[in-house]
Image (cartoon, grey):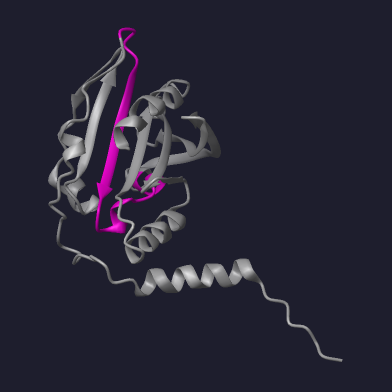
Amino acid sequence: MTKQVKIDLPYLSLILVLVVLALFPLAMPSSWSIDTFRDPLFQKFPMILNDWKGDDVVLDERTYEILETRNVLSRWYVNPEGERIDLLIVGSPSDRRVAHPPEVCYISSNYDVTRTEEASVSFQNKQIPIKEFIAEDKKNPDHREEVLYVYKVGDVFTTNYYAQQFLFIFNRLTARGGQVYLIRLSSPKRVLLPEFLNLILPYLA
């Protein structure tokens, strides 16, 4: 009898993704360079979103070095009740590495990351996946942030770091274009974040 060989498709798919990511040569800058591209979309991103009023946050050079790009929108939004949301969007049309996992950034900034969960929000009659976690300041136990984030690659949303890397490569190889964005929201109050995400997504179309 001929013995059938069972093919583990998920495993083979993972191997293929890792190989492609390892070999993909598009726009990989040297470790000491910072991408100077500035997205026109960021320049016209509204300061006022319904009852929320924004104020730009000035980033230091070290932050740009870590992100490897100056194409960053960092802004506080505050509503009439004094509630605040920190918006951070990092994007690139050519370098997939700028979309770092937020958990890594918080951990490197001396925070504990707890209660990581996958969820979704409704946007334009479809479900957008999101990832949520709590960031607790090790130096100040009374300070904690509720964090929500999602990656956007072209028209596709994902919370998986490797998936957004693969999608970016696929879009480049098939000439589909489109930027990769990391969209991150944080606030002491979790309930504010999904609704605010719905406010900003139309401006990232």
- Residue at 34% x, 44% y is 182
Q: Quadrant of residue 53?
A: top left
Closest to the observer: 31 or 201?
201
Res. 143 in view: no
| Residue 55, percent from left and from top | 19, 23
Q: Can you say whether 168 is above or below 49 in the image?
A: below
Closest to the observer: 45 or 85?
45
- Residue at 32% x, 43% y is 109
Q: Which residues are magenta?
A: 80-105
Quadrant occupied by the N terminus:
bottom right
Residue 86 within the magenta-colored segment of the rendering: yes
Quadrant occupied by the C terminus:
top left
Spot the residue most to the bottom.
1
Spot the residue most to the right.
1
| Residue 90, percent from left and from top | 27, 44
| Residue 130, percent from left and from top | 48, 38
- Residue at 16% x, 40% y is 40
Spot the residue most to the front.
175
- Residue at 38% x, 72% y is 22
Q: Is residue 42 left or right of residue 204?
A: left
Residue 4 within the magenta-colored segment of the rendering: no
Q: Can you say whether 180 is above or below 87 in the image?
A: below
| Residue 31, percent from left and from top | 20, 64
Q: Can you say whether 162 is above or below 158 in the image?
A: below
Q: Is residue 73 left or right of residue 192?
A: left
